[in-house]
Image (cartoon, grey):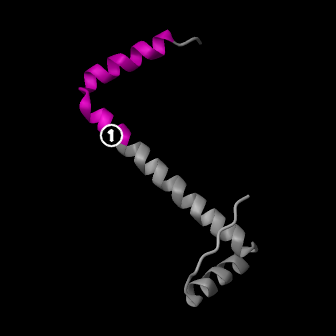
Amino acid sequence: MARMTLRIPKSLHEDIARRADAEGVSINQLVVYALSRELAVQSVEEQRARFESLRDRFPKEEAEAALKELLADRDP
């Protein structure tokens, strides 16, 4: 595992410590979870934007026909 040292305001540290205590986890676990969750949310938003961009580039009928063709070629 890697180690990271952060300089944060005392009030933020206190808020994080209170939340970690309320959740019954360590400050480290809470921060790792929060950062991981934020990165996952960003990844999903980026994927959604790429999907919507692709969706908008093709006419609906063409996309549906291509999907049906792909599904027909799948093994059951």
Give the position of the C terminus as an image quadrant.
top right
Give the position of the N terminus as an image quadrant.
bottom right
The answer to whether residue 34 is magenta is: no
Does 34 appear above or below 60? below
Q: Count neighbours of disc 1 (C-alpha within 10 A) and say few if under 14, some if 14 to 19, many if 20 or more.
A: few
Q: Residue at x 40, y 16 (%)?
A: 68
Q: Quadrant of residue 61?
A: top left
Does 6 appear above or below 51? below
Does 42 appear above or below 10? above
Q: Quadrant of residue 13?
A: bottom right
Does 34 appear above or below 64? below
Q: Residue at x 70, y 75 (%)?
A: 27
Q: Amino acid at mark 1?
A: Glu
Residue 32, position as x, y percentages in the image = 65, 64
Residue 15, position as x, y percentages in the image = 60, 84
Q: Residue at x 40, y 13 (%)?
A: 69
Tag count in the figure?
1
The rendered magenta stretch, by its main secondary structure, is classed as helix
Q: Nearer the viewer, residue 7 or 71?
A: 7
Q: What is the magenta range?
A: 50-73
Which residue in the structure is indicated by mark 1?
A: 52
Q: Residue at x 75, y 72 (%)?
A: 25
Relative side of 10 to 42, left or right? right
Residue 31, position as x, y percentages in the image = 64, 69
